[in-house]
Image (cartoon, rainbow, N blue to C red):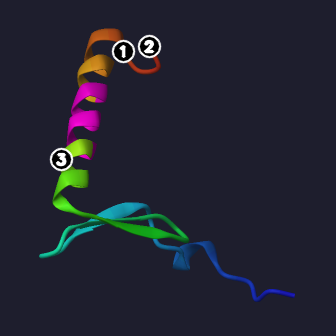
Amino acid sequence: MRPYKPFASRRAPGWTITATGVRLHTDAASQTLNPREVAELQAALTAWLHHQQRTGPGGM
């Protein structure tokens, strides 16, 4: 049986900026992105935000 892990002790999704890159993290995993990957993520998020402004949340 696994020990109970209270919800309050879980790490919230987010990011950390370091000298070597940006570290994305969720409750159970994390991923470090290099500068190229950060630029790709920024471009994708910017495109998504512009799309959301045009169509509204959940719009197609």
Spatial CA span between label 2 and label 3: 25 Å
Quadrant in the picture for residue 47 = top left
Magenta residues, start to end: 41-48
Q: Position of residue 32 (x, y in %)?
A: 32, 68
User: Residue type at mark 1?
Assistant: Gly
Give the foreground label among 2 and 3. Answer: 3
Question: Taking 43 as reference, is 31 above or below it?
Answer: below
Q: Would residue 41 be found to the left or right of residue 19 on screen? A: right
Residue 45 sits above or below residue 6 on the image = above
Disc with the residue nearer the chain's start (1 vs 3): 3
Q: What residue would you read off at disc 2?
A: 59
In the rendered image, the quadrant that contains the C terminus is top left
Q: What residue did someone put label 3 on?
A: 39
| Residue found at x 43% / y 69% | 30
Q: Amino acid at mark 2?
A: Gly
Q: Are marks 2 and 1 in contact (CB under 8 Å)?
A: yes
Seen from this angle, which residue lies furthest right? 1
Residue 31, which numbered label? Answer: none
* Residue 54 picture location, percent across and down: 27, 11
Looking at the image, which is closer to me, 59 or 44? Answer: 44
Q: Is residue 12 above or below residue 60?
A: below
Q: Is residue 27 left or right of residue 13?
A: right
Q: Is residue 21 left or right of residue 15?
A: left
The spot of residue 17 in percent (x, y) is 19, 69
Residues under numbered marks 1 and 3 in contact, where contact means CB atoms less than 8 Å apart: no
Q: Earlier in the sequence, mark 2 or mark 3?
A: 3
Residue at image point 25% right, 53% down: 37
Which mark, residue 56?
Answer: 1
Q: Cα distance, mark 1 to mark 3? A: 25 Å
